[in-house]
Each structure stands twice: as structure tokens, then as C-alpha cells.
Amino acid sequence: ILNVEQSPQSLHVQEGDSTNFTCSFPSSNFYALHWYRWETAKSPEALFVMTLNGDEKKKGRISATLNTKEGYSYLYIKGSQPEDSATYLCAFPPGNQFYFGTGTSLTVIP
Amino acid sequence: NAGVTQTPKFRVLKTGQSMTLLCAQDMNHEYMYWYRQDPGMGLRLIHYSVGEGTTAKGEVPDGYNVSRLKKQNFLLGLESAAPSQTSVYFCASRQGAGEAFFGQGTRLTVV
């Protein structure tokens, strides 16, 4: 069992604010780091799969960076909108297993 | 495109009853996973499979059994349900280093 930690646990921001969350994972034997978006009453959906140190991925207003040497990844949301309200999960697959962090719950207040 | 389908979507069991949850994927993925979601606990891995005929324990396997007789199906069994197994169960599949695809979840209540 590996320790995948996310912070903060929850976040409330005003519409238009930019925000970011952190995912920490074991830096040894790195394979990949995934980010997922999980809306209430739905299933998690993939945002990014990151495999290389220094990787930066972007999808619209959401972007992510990866530092495999120190074991962390940041997810950024620029100009948050109410539809961004969701739980954001990171996942660390050490080989065949696939562990998730406990997530960051984001609420964007109109 | 069906993707990952879980059956059933809802179920209420009495303590001691048994049941099987079915996960079916049509993407020819090798890896399949069963998770449970509890408040404040995120997704916890119950069991997983790396291919047809293989299964392995995750972080919370006690009280559950699994089988992967066909590549497209991953079954999760509860032999004697307990109230502590009240949860939402998610199945996921993936291929190689690719993203995971999730089923819609099964809400199980054990009374």
C-alpha cells in the first residue's frame, strides 16, 4: 500500500479565482501519475496522464505539472467557474496496482 | 460506446446474505479494478486483475472475493454481507499506462 496524499482536502473559491492543488507520491520507482475529475453522482473521468519529470499538460483552463524527483504534482485551474466544482483525484500506479489519493473537493461560488 | 458497465446499480442486502457485482468492459483492457468509496476515505482498492484468470489483493480485500474467468468481466463477490460493507463500489479498467475508465458505480446497503 502506497501513500498518495492530496492537499488541501477541500477548497472554496469565488468564480473567476485561480486555484491549485497538490498531489504527493513516493518518488522511488515512478511509473506514471494520473489526475481525474469526479463530479457528484458521476464516475471519475481522466484529465491527465503524466509520465515524464517536468511534464506539463493543459486542457482548457486546467493544467498540471509533474516533479518525479521530489514526488509531487500540481493541478492548476485558471479563472474557476461553477462547473469546475468537483473532487479532483490523483492516482499513482506502481506497476499493476492503482492507488488514489483522497481527493481535493473544489466548490466554486458564483 | 458502452465502456465499463456495472450491474446492479443499487442493492439492499440483509446481514449474512451473499451477492455478486458484475463489471463488464468492451475495450479489451487487460487491467481491471474494484474500489469502494466511503465518506472521507476516497477510493480504496479492494482487488484487481492483470488479465484473464488472474486476481490479486488490494488494500481492503477482507470479506470480498473476485474472479476473472473472461477478459471482459470482473466479478466481485460478498459471501456473507456485513453492515461495514455498505458503500459505493466502482469498477475500473485500463490498458498499460493509459487512463482508467470507470463504471457508473453500485450503491450497496447492508442492513
Image: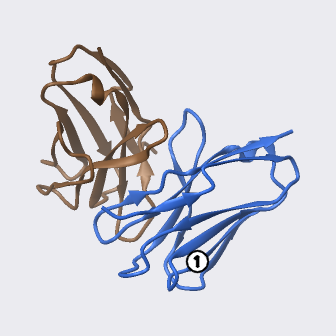
Chain colours: A blue, B brown
From the viewer's perspective, is residue B98 above or below residue B33?
A: below
From the viewer's perspective, is residue B96 above or below residue A54?
A: above
Q: Quadrant of the C terminus of chain A?
A: top right
Q: Nearer the viewer, residue A45 or A20?
A: A20
Residue A25 appears at what percent x and percent y?
46, 70
**The quarter of the displayed image where residue A55 is located:** bottom right
Helix, strand or loop status at disc 1: strand
How many numbered circles does the render carry?
1
Q: Which residue lies at the image location 81% right of the left edge and 52% below the top edge?
A: A80
Q: Which residue lies at the image location 81% right of the left edge and 61% below the top edge?
A: A78
From the viewer's perspective, is residue B53 above or below residue A54?
A: above
Please indicate whether residue B5 sits to the left or right of residue A106 in the image. left
Q: Quadrant of the N terminus of chain A?
A: bottom left
Q: Chain of mark 1?
A: A
From the viewer's perspective, is residue A53 above or below residue A50?
A: below
Q: Nearer the viewer, residue A32 or B62?
A: B62
Please indicate whether residue B31 sits to the left or right of residue A51 in the image. left
Q: Which residue matches tag 1?
A: A66
Q: Amino acid at mark 1?
A: Leu
Q: Which residue lies at the image location 15% right of the left edge and 18% below the top edge?
A: B16
**The quarter of the displayed image where residue B84 is located:** top left
- Local packing at callout 1 (Cα closer than 10 Å; few below 14, some 14-19, many 20+) is many
Residue B75 appears at what percent x and percent y?
21, 40
Residue B31 appears at what percent x and percent y?
28, 59
Residue A42 appears at what percent x and percent y?
54, 37
